[in-house]
Amino acid sequence: MDFLQIVSLLLVLAAGFGAINYLVLKLPSAIGILIVA
């Protein structure tokens, strides 16, 4: 994997975790992403 693929994968994972937090956990964004991570 080159650098661009790694960066895009990290962005997709962060967006996915943010969506899980928004739809399921309903915590403030910083706290929710810390818990999911």
Image (cartoon, rainbow, N blue to C red):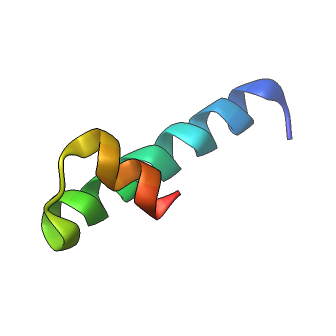
4 on left or right of 27: right
For image coordinates 44% across by 50% down, the residue present is 34
Q: Is residue 25 left or right of residue 10?
A: left
Looking at the image, is 20 positioned above or below residue 9? below
- Quadrant of image for the N terminus: top right
Residue 13 in percent (x, y) is at: 51, 51
Using the image as rendered, state which of residue 12 and residue 14 is in the foreground.
14
Residue ID at (50%, 38%): 11
User: In terms of depth relative to the viewer, which is nearer, 10 or 36?
Assistant: 36
Say if 31 sits above or below 22 in the image.
above
Residue 3 lies left or right of residue 29; in this view the side is: right
Q: Nearer the viewer, residue 29 or 5?
A: 29
Q: Quadrant of residue 32?
A: bottom left
Nearer to us in this view, 5 or 25:
25
Q: Residue at x 29, y 65 (%)?
A: 20
In the orientation shown, which residue stands out farthest toward the right? 1
Q: Is residue 28 above or below residue 35?
A: above
Residue at left 19%, top 73%?
24
Numbered disc total: 0
Residue 3 in the image, given as x and y percentages of width and height: 79, 26
Write down the quadrant of residue 8 in the picture.
top right
Q: Would residue 8 appear left or right of 15 to someone viewing this image?
A: right
Residue 33 pos. (x, y %): 39, 50
> Farthest residue in the bottom direction?
24
